[in-house]
Image (cartoon, rainbow, N blue to C red):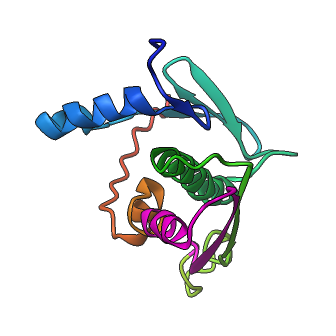
Amino acid sequence: MSTEDKVLNGVNVTQLLRYIWKVRNDPTLADRNPTLVAHWVGESRSRIEFRKIVTHIGGEGELNPMMMLLSSYAACQVDLVVLHASFLGLKIKSLSVEATGHFDVRRYLGFDDAPGPGYDKIVLTVRIRAPGATPEQVAHLREKCERSCPVGDSLAQAIPLKLEIEADSS
């Protein structure tokens, strides 16, 4: 970070604008293709590994996978609001995203005639305190939340899913 870089809300706006300019000239710089591995730890607990990052999902006292999906959506919105508020020059005093969703676990439990086990609705409530924010800036942030969230976009579209099982029966 140079002494000329503008940092707001923990975001190096200058550095990010440089990156955006590079992406305009070479869109492949924006491509992401992460691969992570989930290992069974015991009961319903998984250890998730991505490069040198390790986290756990499920099990006693942990968020389950459906809660993690909901929290991923909320956390992506936090990231998006902070980024675009910083681009607008808004200093955030507080920000929270409340995520609520409904799903039915009967199919998960083996009831084949039950509805699908995924969320059938999700509602987010973004609460931001940014002194001096204009109604236009708040509307801009809302538009970014509705249209630019990678997790939200993923949830809203039909993503082709493929499951392969490699079994060692020895």
Q: Quadrant of residue 25?
A: top left
Q: Residue furthest left?
A: 25
Q: Residue 65: x, y in percent? A: 65, 53
56 lies left or right of 76:
right
Question: Is residue 115 placed above or below 91 in the rendered structure?
Answer: below
Q: Quadrant of residue 156?
A: bottom left
Q: Residue furthest right?
A: 61
Q: How many marks?
A: 0
Magenta span of residues: 117-144
In this orientation, which residue lies closer to the viewer: 91 or 18? Answer: 91
In this orientation, which residue lies closer to the viewer: 134 or 24? Answer: 134
Q: Quadrant of residue 54?
A: top right
Q: Residue furthest front?
A: 132
106 lies left or right of 166:
right
Residue at 56%, 27% (x, y): give it.
49
61 lies left or right of 51:
right
Question: Is residue 43 placed above or below 52 in the rendered structure?
Answer: below
In this orientation, which residue lies closer to the viewer: 20 or 134? Answer: 134
Question: Is residue 16 placed above or below 134 in the rendered structure?
Answer: above
In this orientation, which residue lies closer to the viewer: 58 or 96? Answer: 96
Residue 136 belongs to the span the image colors magenta: yes
Question: Is residue 29 placed above or below 4 in the rendered structure?
Answer: below
Q: Residue 73: x, y in percent? A: 56, 58
Residue at 69%, 56% (x, y): give it.
131
Residue at 48%, 20% (x, y): give it.
51
Residue at 65%, 55% (x, y): give it.
71
Q: Residue 113: x, y in percent? A: 56, 87
Residue 41 belongs to the span the image colors magenta: no
